[in-house]
Amino acid sequence: MMKMKKVCLSLALLLILALSISAVVAQDEVVTLTMGSWRTEDIEQWDAIIAAFNEEFPNIQVNFEPTLNTEYDSSLLVALQGGGGPDLVTCRPFDISLALYEQGYLTDVSDTPGLENFGDVARSGWIADDGTIYCVPMASVLHGFIYSVDMFNENGWEVPATVDEFTALLETIDAAGITPLAMGTRDGWTNWTMGFHSNAPNWYMGEAGRQALLAGDAAITDAMFVEPMEFVLSWAPYLPDGFEAISYADTQQLFPLGLAAIFPAGSWEIPIFEANADFELGAFKPPVPEAGQECFVTDHVDIGLGMNANTEHPEAVMTFLEWVAGPEFAERYTNLQPGFFSLSDYEIDITNPLAQEMASWRQECSTTIRLEAQYLSRGEISPRLEAWRLFPAAFAGEVTVEEMAAELQTYLWYPDGE
């Protein structure tokens, strides 16, 4: 009997040892995740970010596999519908990603540790109507103007604070034989995004006006929306010759070559211009209509990260998402991607001077997101896409501002259909 007990004990010890070895093997097993994105230009930055993640989590390898931005949405949807797709899904804000969640392709990540450090505006881009968060917020972009500091210094030009000062500056630059603004109308999204979205909040008072539009208490035909459209259209004499045929890509070349003084910009332009311009760059806020008025800037939620519901490695994905929701990622991402700003409440030391300047506007002004991005674009016809069509037509004199505003109002989506 004693011999039998010893045999049993030995077997038990062997079993425990085997289980321990199995656990060690499991801990040492490397899990490989894929991350999809529309930003092919971010490969180097993500390699650095993932390397930092692997210092803490060496057994989770993440392969950043971006797709061309014009193909990302469609190719991602096809992959998800086929039961595949990347483990980590880079999420566009609002309705595109919401549709993926509602179709069951994105997972509820509401309980991700660290999300408590993201406010309501940060979450707004990736929150379902029932309050579920389906993507971890990563970054926003700021709207304003980037300009040639060298050109301003050489000519004694001052950064404008008001609309009148801005218009007078454009006139002065034009009189000096220099193109004031690097913007064309071939790609109408630039007129709407870097024209209207950048400047209009100073007329409709940011969130107050946006919420009034959402509630149906205001209409795009109201003066607070029409007047900033008129302001953007007033730029026509100060755009490059032949602006009707000039594309966004053209202006991205024109400005860093010193062929225009000011670029109506989003902060995402910072790395591109710093790489290509041989002059010092500066940035200034959209001008306010009246001196002393409170200022507003568009700080638009832009990029989130979610979990593919089909992933075979949900625990590893959640580990990465929790790290993305933390302070180390926030600071690394903000500094490796100048012009993309963490949506978290963490205190971040921004090292890029131009990004610092633009980020400081958050303390100087109230912030809002793009006017029609939330809820209002859920109809069959997109007001955003129609604005891209209408603005070039308005620049060409084919439609009036009033006609443009009236048409855009008909495309806004409301739950009651009104």
Image (tube, rainbow, N blue to C red):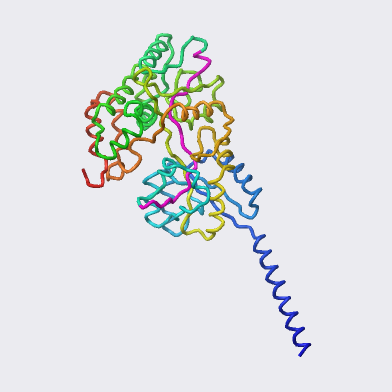
103 w.r.t. 224: above or below: below
Q: Nearer the viewer, residue 392 or 413?
A: 413
Question: Residue drawn 63% across and 58% down?
Answer: 30
Q: Nearer the viewer, residue 176 or 369?
A: 369
23 w.r.t. 117: above or below: below
Could you say where residue 285 lies in the image, as x and y percent from the top left? 43, 24
Say which quadrant the C terminus sits in. top left
Q: Nearer the viewer, residue 247 or 76?
A: 76
Could you say where residue 18 lies in the image, as x and y percent from the top left? 70, 72
Q: Which span is picked out in magenta?
A: 130-152
Question: Residue drawn 60% across and 43% down?
Answer: 47
Could you say where residue 347 lies in the image, as x and y percent from the top left? 55, 36
Question: Residue drawn 68% across and 64% down?
Answer: 24
Q: Is 147 in the magenta?
A: yes
**Residue 389's quadrant in the figure?**
top left
| Residue furthest out toward the right | 3
Query: Total marks drawn?
Result: 0
Question: Residue drawn 65% across and 50% down?
Answer: 56
Q: Tell whether 114 sits left or right of 401.
A: right
Q: Tell whether 121 sits left or right of 327.
A: left
Q: Is 40 in the magenta?
A: no
Say which quadrant the N terminus sits in. bottom right
Q: Tell whether 74 sits left or right of 313.
A: left
Could you say where residue 48 lies in the image, as x and y percent from the top left? 61, 41
Q: Do we see residue 393 in this rendering?
A: no
Q: Nearer the viewer, residue 264 or 364?
A: 364
